Image (cartoon, rainbow, N blue to C red):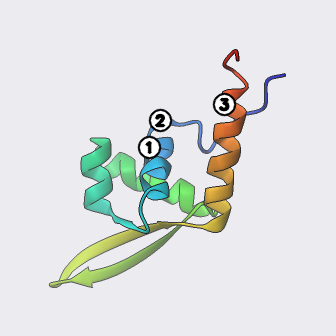
Amino acid sequence: MFKDLDPILHSQLRLAVMSLLVGTEQADFNFLKEKTQSSAGNLSVQITKLEEAGYISVLKTYENKRPKTICKITAAGLSAFETYVKALKTYFPE
């Protein structure tokens, strides 16, 4: 009856990042930090975990001589997110 929940997505901050990326084409680090109200260090670690899982792609560039990190959800990430949401719904009575 209950479906397994993806342990990568079953973290509050990683789920928040994925939820934000589902609604946008891309988001930079500062946007994600502001919206999730997380520390830079914690967000950086969680972004790395999502990237290693293949759920997001990360592009590091420079803008006005300052580093800029841009995150995009991948097709695998979108699929994993949709599967996670479906699995989570099995925990709620109809």
Relative image position of residue 24 (x, y in whole percent): 41, 62
Q: Circle 2 is placed at which residue position?
A: 12
Marks 1 and 3 in Cβ contact (< 8 Å): no
Relative image position of residue 47 (x, y in whole percent): 46, 56
Q: Is residue 83 left or right of residue 27?
A: right
Nearer to us in this view, 42 or 19? 19
**For mark 1, does the 10 Å Cα neighbourhood hold few (<14), some (14 to 19), or many (20 or more) residues?**
some
Residue at the spot x=69%, y=21% of the render?
Answer: 91
Instruction: Classify the position of the C terminus by image quarter.
Output: top right
Disc with the residue nearer the chain's start (2 vs 3): 2
Relative image position of residue 30 (x, y in whole percent): 25, 59
Marks 1 and 2 in Cβ contact (< 8 Å): yes
**For mark 2, does the 10 Å Cα neighbourhood hold few (<14), some (14 to 19), or many (20 or more) residues?**
few
Q: Given this view, does label 1 or label 3 mark the residue nearer the observer?
A: 3
How far is mark 2 from mark 3, CA to CA?
14 Å
Disc with the residue nearer the chain's start (1 vs 3): 1
Residue extending farthest right = 1
Residue at the spot x=37%, y=46% of the render?
Answer: 42
- Callout 3 amino acid: Leu
Mark 2: which secondary structure?
helix
Q: Given this view, does label 2 or label 3 mark the residue nearer the observer?
A: 3
Q: Circle 3 is placed at which residue position?
A: 88
Label ID, residue 16: 1
Q: Is residue 94 left or right of residue 52?
A: right
**For mark 3, does the 10 Å Cα neighbourhood hold few (<14), some (14 to 19), or many (20 or more) residues?**
some
